[in-house]
Image: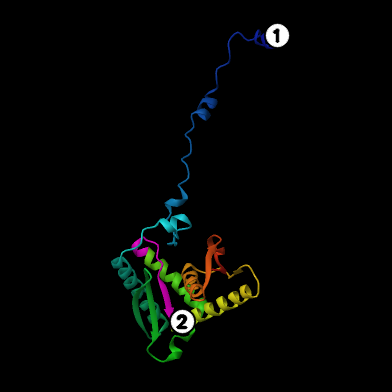
Amino acid sequence: MNDIDSTSADHDVAPEATPEARVETDAPVASPAPAVDAVPGPPTRREPVGDAAAASPAPSAQSIIDEGEIAADYIEELLDICDFDGDIDIEVRAGRSYISIDSSGGEGSLRLLSKPDTVNALQELTRIAVQAKTGEFSRLILDIGGSRATREQELGAMVDRAVEKIEEGAAAASLPPMSSYERKLVHDIVAARGFTSESEGEGRDRHTVITRA
C-alpha cells in the first residue's frame, strides 16, 4: 500500500488514454462464423435405437404401400442405369414393405446384384432414397433374385449348429450380429426348433442368444 501511494504522488492527474487506444478499444467485433449445420449435406438414415425404436408407432398400411412405390421407382431407375431387366413386386410382410426383384431376361441378368453384400448395400441406398422423400425412417426389405430365401437357409443352418451345441451341454449359444429383420427370422426358426432366443447387445453388436425353452 505504501509503495502504491508513493508512486502515485508524483502524478496528480492520471494520463488520458491516447486516441489510438480509444480507436483500438472501439474496434468492431468480428461476426461469428456461420453454424456448420447451416450448410445442407447429403441425406442420412436416422435409425431409431433401443427404447426409441420400440416406442415408435407402427406405420399405417397405406404408408407402407407408398414407401414400396417410392422404392420401386428408385430401383427401376437403378436397373435402367445398369441396363438390367427385372420384374419388381411390392408386398407387405410383418409390417414392412418387401420389394422383390426377379429377372425377366434369364438368371444371369441379376446374378451380379444378388450377392448378399450387394443386396444389403442396395437395400441401404433404397432406404435412404425413401427417407429423403418421406422424411421417415424406412425398414423396407429388398430381395433380389431370391437372395433372401438363400439367406434364410443359411440362418436355419446357423440355428441348427447352435442348437446342437446346447444339446451337447452348452448353457447358451450366441449367433453373430445381424439386422433386426434377420434376428426376427432367427427367433421364428428357434421357436420352431423348440428353443428360446433373445436379442442382446446394442447397435451393430446386437445379436441373438439361444437357450433351452
The mark found on residue 161 in the picture is none
Separation (CA) of disc 2 from disc 1:
94 Å
- Which kind of residue does numbered mark 1 sit on? Asn
The mark found on residue 149 in the picture is 2
Q: Which residue is mark 1?
A: 2
> What is the x, y in percent for residue 16?
55, 17
**Vertical arrangement, residue 199 with respect to residue 14, above or below:** below
> What is the x, y in percent for residue 25?
52, 28
Say which residue appears at 57% left-offset and 69% top-offset: 212
**Vertical arrangement, residue 93 with respect to residue 30, above or below:** below
In the image, 134 versus 176, the foreground residue is 176
Quarter location, residue 75: bottom left
**Vertical arrangement, residue 156 with respect to residue 213, above or below:** below
What segment carries the magenta color?
132-144
- Residue at disc 2, secondary structure: helix
Was residue 116 drawn as part of the magenta stretch in this picture? no
Say which residue appears at 46% left-offset and 48% top-offset: 35
Say which residue appears at 30% left-offset and 67% top-offset: 61
- Residue at disc 1, secondary structure: helix
Mark 2 Cα within 10 Å, few/some/many (few <14, many 20+)? few
Mark 1 Cα within 10 Å, few/some/many (few <14, many 20+)? few
Sooner in the amino-acid sequence: mark 2 or mark 1: 1
Horizontally, residue 205 falls left or right of residue 95, namely right
- Which kind of residue does numbered mark 2 sit on? Ala
Quarter location, residue 48: bottom left
Horizontally, residue 26 falls left or right of residue 135, namely right
> What is the x, y in percent for residue 53?
44, 58
